[in-house]
Amino acid sequence: MKNPFNEHVRVRFAPSPTGFLHIGNLRTALYNELLARHFNGDFILRIEDTDRTRIVEGGVENICRSLQATGVIPNEGIWLDEKGELFERGDYGPYLQSACRERHLEQAEKLVTMDKAYYCFCSTEHLDDLRKKQQAKKQPTMYDGSCRKLDPTEARKKVESGESHVIRLKLPKHGLISFNDIIRGKVTFDWSVIDDQVIIKSDGFPTYHLAATSDDNHMAISHVLRGEEWVSSTPKHLFIYEAFGWKIPQFAHLPLLLNKDKSKLSKRQSDVATEDYLKNGYLPEALLNFVALLGWNPSAEREIYSHDELVELFSVEKINHSGAVFNLEKLDWLNSQYIKQLPKKKYLKLARTYLETAITDDAYIDRCLLMLSDRIVRFGNVTDLAKDFLDLKKDYSGVSLTWKKQTTEDATEKLEALKELLESLSADDVAKMEKSESAIKSLILERGWTNGETLWPLRVALSGQEKSPSPFELLAIYGKDRSLGLLENALKHLRAS
């Protein structure tokens, strides 16, 4: 497909190593990967670790593992080798942002020299007091520019004497700035409402605004696909690009992920961590399919797409700019569809991974799991779904073994006759649904009974539930001996009633 951007596509996913990959960040990574692969470009994983207070040990490895598990694989940047150790690949490193600190500091100092930035010595107390006063007056909370007017020579002396300081951008205070967003179209801001952003913190590390802009330029990033929370910061980034005369990438700000009530999706790990969805038995393919459609869908006629199909059909221009609701019911439905499509061998292997049971009869377990294949929404609930079929000690106290107005005596008569019939059948016949069904229906016809008054007690006796698979399916799963044991238990319950 022809590339309408007329340049080699280079995109990056640049998360902070905070300990887990947020499901929203997975979508950002996926959209970047889809764009790169669609145009045979490069997808880069860069780690933005300059906020030292938020770093979690093992966070980078977690991000890599989560991306690897879902098949969103960068071809450049930070990655894990076969031993699970971090390494870098590509010609535009370092890909760990903290390793670029010297470059960031040099560029910040150059901005000061160019009168595009300035040293700020305001204390935390002063800034807190300023913010409280602005909030009391219901004003936007912004820096008041106290240090903008400092004499540069005096400011330099303060820095050289070791006085604590930050470096802020010296942004225009009048006029408008506009940029084109691939998703949102023309976006315009008034400079008067944009704060003089800190670009170097008092600890000597750059903030996102300088570091990300510098690294994007250094890595020749052609497109920046990121969350919409960065829309309001884009003018600051454009200011830096223009100050250095760097080529400006194309921007696309992705819609927020929302809860059903339209509030912003939680950031609590147990709610939105990619690893937790995978641990709970959502298939990577289903999770990726679901995440891809949070704000974009190439067709109103389909919901299920393979990764390769998503690559082929992807278009940034067709991403919605409004928030996308994270619908867990839709994820459950998608996952169940993917489970149904699994080959038998793979399905059983995955289901067994999540199943907790003391039973060692593999053939019996497989029969139970195959019976549940159409009912499993995610593998994480396979134990709950299977427990009633793996537990042969049924509790009949909460169910009715009798059909409608059927008497206990009549239900007992039916089960005793069925038990006698099963005893006369071979184990192979009981294991074959068509054989047991034919034998039982012949018995019903011969005795002049109805299906309801005969099959209801049988099904409840076998399942311990009033809603369950057919009795013939249950007989095939349990086999002759287990089925006879369950019928005997049910008869004991009826006789004691």
Image (tube, rainbow, N blue to C red):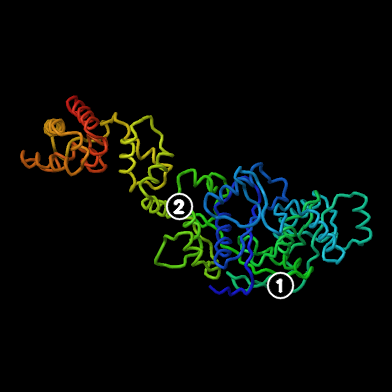
Look at label 2 and name its amino acid: Leu
Q: Which residue is mark 1?
A: 177
User: At 26% from the left edge and 38% from the top edge, which residue is drawn?
Assistant: 477
Residue 368 vs 236, above or below: the answer is: above
Q: Nearer the viewer, residue 125 or 13?
A: 13
**Does residue 85 appear anywhere in the picture?**
yes
Where is residue 29? Give x, y as percent. 58, 57
The residues tagged by marks 2 and 1 sit, at their Cα atoms, a distance apart of: 39 Å
Q: Nearer the viewer, residue 312 or 28?
A: 312
| SS class, disc 1 | strand
Look at label 1 and name its amino acid: Ile
Q: Which badge, 2 or 1, comes first in the chain's sequence?
A: 1
Pointers 2 and 1 in contact (CB under 8 A)?
A: no
Q: Nearer the viewer, residue 77 or 127?
A: 77
Q: Quadrant of residue 404?
A: top left
> Which mark is drawn over residue 307?
none
In the picture, measured across the screen, residue 421 lies left or right of residue 81, that is left
Q: Which residue is mark 2?
A: 328
User: At 61% from the left edge and 57% from the top edge, which residue is drawn?
Assistant: 75
Where is residue 63? Give x, y as percent. 60, 49
In the picture, measured across the screen, residue 264 lies left or right of residue 382, that is right
Where is residue 421? Give x, y as percent. 13, 33
Q: Nearer the viewer, residue 350 or 228?
A: 350
User: At 47% from the left edge and 57% from the top edge, which residue is drawn?
Assistant: 289
10 Å crowding of disc 1: few (<14), some (14-19), many (20+): some
